[in-house]
Image (spheres, rainbow, N blue to C red):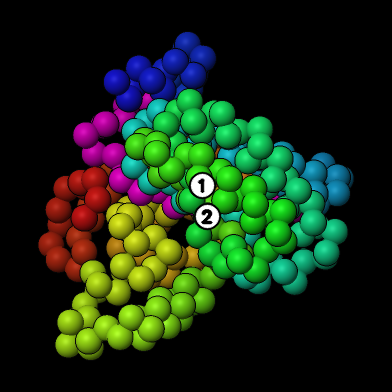
Amino acid sequence: MALEDLLAVVPAGSAEEGLARHVDFDRLPQHIAVIMDGNGRWAAQRHLPRVEGHRAGIESVRDVVEGSARLGIRVLTLYAFSVENWKRPASEVSTLMMLLKRYLRLELNTLLRNNIRFKVIGRSDELARDVQDELRAAEDKTAVNRGMQFNIALNYGGRAEIIEAAKRMLIARVDPDTLDEARFSGFLYTAGQPDPDLLIRTSGEMRISNFLLWQIAYAEIWVTDTLWPDFRKRNLLEAILAYQKRDRRYGGITQPVVAGR
């Protein structure tokens, strides 16, 4: 049904339709993580304020969330705001938070209709109270959904996540002799979720920006020069097709690409 679901929201005869028909739906990545980059450059190229790039990027979020859900992706994680982003001008940060709240209000019915479960990962308790309320409402209202898990990484840092996981282990008095990778993963924000199989970065930058440092150990990385506000289902399909052409070795010999580990 995934192909039919996706074709229902792409124009007939379009590039998206052609790409979708080449996807092997038995070998989809279980978890796709995206570093959404390039909003500021997109705006600068059009001689617009940076905040207009963030506004335009919201449409890409809508498109990629819908496309991923209809493809049958199990988990989608979008990197929205890092712990380092507080260094940006206060007016820009304020606009980003306003856009986040607006997105959650406007898209909640879409998330419910598509059976998508929403979760925020990061230090959400450090955000403004009104932002926390919107995030909690979206999590609560979609908690019973059993379709795609949609994570937004907000006030997130990979190193900070690892430190917090270590602190939680100490509080839980974990016996060091019982500690292994699987148990440690249970203390991360993404506990219970598969690690990303595919990491996408837009804007052409060749770095991972402190994102999911533990979880992306074996992820395939796909970088595109496309700026985030221009990223659409077509680009998502291109990334998936590139992923399906790769061999995932996990330090061993060549193996066919399979979904997950």
Eyeballing the image, is 58 above or below 252? Answer: above
Q: Is residue 40 visible in this depiction of the protein?
A: yes
Can you give x and y, in whole percent of width and height, for residue 15 in the image?
Answer: 48, 22
Residue at the location (22% across, 86% down)?
175
Q: How many circles with numbers are drawn on the protein?
A: 2
> Which element is circle 1 on?
helix
**Residue at image location 76% in from the left, 48% down from the top:** 98
Q: What's the residue type where badge 1 is placed? A: Glu
Left or right side of 233 for 43:
right
Q: Is residue 154 left or right of residue 26?
A: right
The reply to whether the magenta stretch includes residue 21 is yes
Q: Residue 48's x, y, as percent?
A: 86, 45
- Asked if the residues shown at circle 2 and circle 1 are in contact, with their CB atoms under 8 angstroms apart, the answer is yes
Residue 156 in magenta stretch: no
Residue type, label 2: Val
User: Residue at position x 31%, y 45% from top?
Assistant: 29
Residue at left offset 33%, top offset 80%: 172
Residue 239 shows up from this direction:
no
State the residue position of label 1: 139
Element under label 2?
strand
Q: Quadrant of residue 125?
A: bottom right
**Which one is in front, 201 or 119?**
119
Q: Quick one: 75 or 63, which is closer to the camera?
A: 75
Cα distance, mark 2 to mark 1? 8 Å
Quadrant where the image shows the N terminus: top left
What stretch of residues is rendered in magenta?
A: 20-41
Query: In front: mark 2 or mark 1?
Result: 1
Does 46 sit above or below residue 250? above
What's the mark number on residue 120?
2
